[in-house]
Image: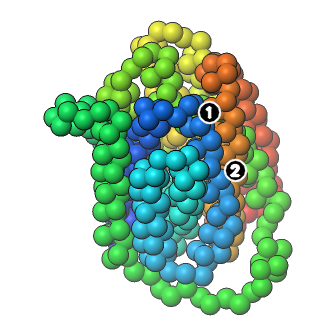
């Protein structure tokens, strides 16, 4: 496996390498932010319902920008998109911490996710333009694996920084969280340095009108790709944004302990990511995606039922590894199935489907947890994951990949 990666990594383009470097810093900063933000909000006095709404507004920002982002990616230099979307997102994230009133947190959370989503939607088309078919799945998986390592570092740092700040400077925990969040934003900002050195050919100036462009997309295939993703997004939004609160509330853990468990998850996710290209080649990308979803369900059930911390940690880690290791394979499959002209739009619709579903379920997830418990959210998520795996297989089993990223029914 290591020899395979070394062989294919040598084929990565300069642009791809620069993006990977920037992605490391982006990942570290965002991992610290995502680990601590909910805990900061709860420490500051916001309810779980408030936190669910904040997360929902953030997902809404990612949802509404999806289609405009596709049009932006088709018309502008990717270097500019990566650079400016990161800058604007950082300004919004900073404002989200600086302002303490709920309406402004909603607003800047919406804007932060809007801008960072333009950056994320640009990644898959960027990789398709800057790679060849032979190394592409390794590039997608290696990028995801680096994201796991970045998240590992971020989770470790994020878990300990508040406690260190509280001890050394004798500040309150809420203020320690706030300082740590500002530091995470600075770390993310370093990513714009390698992005600055990316080069790309000028984007063709197409004058096709919007209506004709929309009619030209392969909606039959795109819809079949998106329905399973919507079901996964609905399920994930109910529980995944609240996993730090799950460990905090159910097991009374502090941030540094939660950070350790999130770090362990990143290690397992890293090995899952790097093994994904080899395993998916043996079993096909579609079968790999379906079975990783199915195998994650028993671990979700354990999280719903157990009060034993070691078992909960094992289930948390294995569930996260299985669900996330198929992510780059799923993206690669989508990009390979659709025609090249549809790639940016398909990736945008993919983001729209995921974030739209996440927006709805994150809003209700906080309410369900506050009124009932985490258990009910886990049960609903299990049902949605089963539906996603079933529809993924039924909708896409008739498709196979052809050599030039075209598709056909067999």
Picture layout, residue 236 above or below residue 56:
above
Q: What colour scheme has been applied to the protein in the rendered image?
A: rainbow
On-image quarter of the N terminus: top left
Q: Are marks 1 and 2 in contact (CB under 8 Å)?
A: no
Crowding around mark 1 (Cα neighbors within 10 Å: few <14, some 14 to 19, many 20+) is: some
> Residue 91 at x, y = what percent?
43, 63
Q: Is residue 9 visible?
A: no
Which residue is under mark 2? 356
On-image quarter of the C terminus: bottom right
Picture layout, residue 322 above or below residue 285:
above
Crowding around mark 2 (Cα neighbors within 10 Å: few <14, some 14 to 19, many 20+) is: many
> Residue 53 at x, y = what percent?
62, 41
* Mark closer to the observer (1, 2): 1
Picture layout, residue 318 above or below residue 394:
above
Picture layout, residue 174 above or below residue 116:
above
Left or right position of 93 against 167: right
Which residue is under mark 1? 49
């Amino acid at each position: 496996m290591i020899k395979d990666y070394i062989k294919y990594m040598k084929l990565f383009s300069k642009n791809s390498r620069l993006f990977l470097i920037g992605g490391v810093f982006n990942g570290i900063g965002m991992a610290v932010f995502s680990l601590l933000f909910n805990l900061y909000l709860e420490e500051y006095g916001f309810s779980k319902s408030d936190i669910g709404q904040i997360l929902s507004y953030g997902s809404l920002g990612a949802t509404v920008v999806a289609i405009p982002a596709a049009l932006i990616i088709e018309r502008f230099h990717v270097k500019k998109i990566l650079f400016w979307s990161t800058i604007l997102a950082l300004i919004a994230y900073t404002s989200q911490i600086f302002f303490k009133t709920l309406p402004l947190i909603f607003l800047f959370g919406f804007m932060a996710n809007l801008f960072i989503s333009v950056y994320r939607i640009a990644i898959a088309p960027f990789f398709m333009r800057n790679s060849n078919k032979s190394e592409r799945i390794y590039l997608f998986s290696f990028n995801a694996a680096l994201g796991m390592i970045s998240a590992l570092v971020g989770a470790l740092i994020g878990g300990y920084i508040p406690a260190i700040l509280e001890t050394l400077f004798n500040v309150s925990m809420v203020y320690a969280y706030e300082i740590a969040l500002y530091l995470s934003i600075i770390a993310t900002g370093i990513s714009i340095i390698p992005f600055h050195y990316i080069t790309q050919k000028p984007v063709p100036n197409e004058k096709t009108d919007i209506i004709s462009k929309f009619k030209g997309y392969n909606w039959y295939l795109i819809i079949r790709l998106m329905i399973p993703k919507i079901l996964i997004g609905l399920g994930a939004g109910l529980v995944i944004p609240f996993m730090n609160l799950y460990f905090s509330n159910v097991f009374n853990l502090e941030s540094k302990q939660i950070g350790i468990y999130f770090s362990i998850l990143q290690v397992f996710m890293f090995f899952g990511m790097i093994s994904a290209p080899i395993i998916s080649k043996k079993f096909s990308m579609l079968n790999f995606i379906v079975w990783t979803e199915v195998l994650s369900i028993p671990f979700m059930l354990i999280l719903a039922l157990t009060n034993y911390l070691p078992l909960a940690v094992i289930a948390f880690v294995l569930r996260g590894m299985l669900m996330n290791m198929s992510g780059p394979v799923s993206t690669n499959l989508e990009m390979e199935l659709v025609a090249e002209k549809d790639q940016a739009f398909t990736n945008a619709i993919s983001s729209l489907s995921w974030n739209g579903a996440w927006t709805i379920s994150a809003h209700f997830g906080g309410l369900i947890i506050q009124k009932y418990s985490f258990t009910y959210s886990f049960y609903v998520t299990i049902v949605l994951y089963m539906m996603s795996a079933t529809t993924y297989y039924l909708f896409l089993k008739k498709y196979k990949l052809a050599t030039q990223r075209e598709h056909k029914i067999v």
